[in-house]
Amino acid sequence: EPEVTQTPSHQVTQMGQEVILRCVPISNHLYFYWYRQILGQKVEFLVSFYNNEISEKSEIFDDQFSVERPDGSNFTLKIRSTKLEDSAMYFCASSVRGQGFPGELFFGEGSRLTVL
Amino acid sequence: GQSLEQPSEVTAVEGAIVQINCTYQTSGFYGLSWYQQHDGGAPTFLSYNALDGLEETGRFSSFLSRSDSYGYLLLQELQMKDSASYFCADPGGGNKLTFGTGTQLKVEL
């Protein structure tokens, strides 16, 4: 069964360092997303990406964050200068259609980011 | 703004039926999805209600009432493996899934 894969599963970094989280969405999906979940809290939307551009982003997704689809398979989230409050589980997701339709997103297992 | 509120925790016994409620206040409400999450892992899609009424998928059913801004997930014949967190979510009219506060379900013997 096709699945969304994410690497690394866990990354520890020092405050102020740059981090890149990688995702391989399901191959025939067209919409890609990043969400995050701070421990014990709800899942929060960060950004959606379609046709090689950002289609929507939340207020969390400030100038420190960027996304890229560098090739036909990978989808990356970059945090330029990490802060302690960026510590969270980051989930990549993909879907066949945009979220205006049945909200079936396929999520990866997540990348846990710990900022020290 | 958008908010979807759920009880933080529900406990039930194996074999029982449990209902997890979700009340929402959203602008441009589109419909209600439900996701399951085990131990902080990947959220997994369970169901989607675009229209009022009950949708049934095996042991799980989901209900929506737009007039009451309310929905619920009904789990029947509970099994130990159903112990997980459950989130309602609004897909929105755009490309942004807004999740509820989440309910941790504990199934006991």
Image (tube, rainbow, N blue to C red):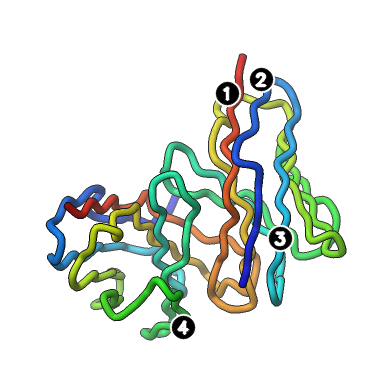
Residue at 37%, 64% in the rendered image: A25
Mark 1 lies on a secondary structure that is helix
The Cα–Cα distance between marks 4 and 3, rounded to whole angstroms, is: 25 Å
| Crowd tier of the residue under label 4, counting other residues whose Cα lies within 10 Å: few below 14, some 14–19, many 20 or above | some
Question: Which badge, 3 or 1, is on the more N-terminal residue?
Answer: 3
Q: Chain of mark 4?
A: A
Identify residue for label 3: B24
From the viewer's perspective, tell me whether residue B84 is left or right of residue A59: right
**Snapshot quadrant of residue B99:** bottom right
From the viewer's perspective, tell me whether residue A110 is left or right of residue B73: left
The Cα–Cα distance between marks 3 and 2, rounded to whole angstroms, is: 29 Å
The Cα–Cα distance between marks 4 and 2, rounded to whole angstroms, is: 43 Å
Identify residue for label 1: B80
The Cα–Cα distance between marks 4 and 1, rounded to whole angstroms, is: 40 Å
Image vertical order of residue A72 relative to residue A17, above or below: below
Question: Which badge, 3 or 2, is on the more N-terminal residue?
Answer: 2
1 and 2 marks on the same chain = yes
Identify residue for label 4: A55
What is the three-letter code of the residue carrying label 2?
A: Glu
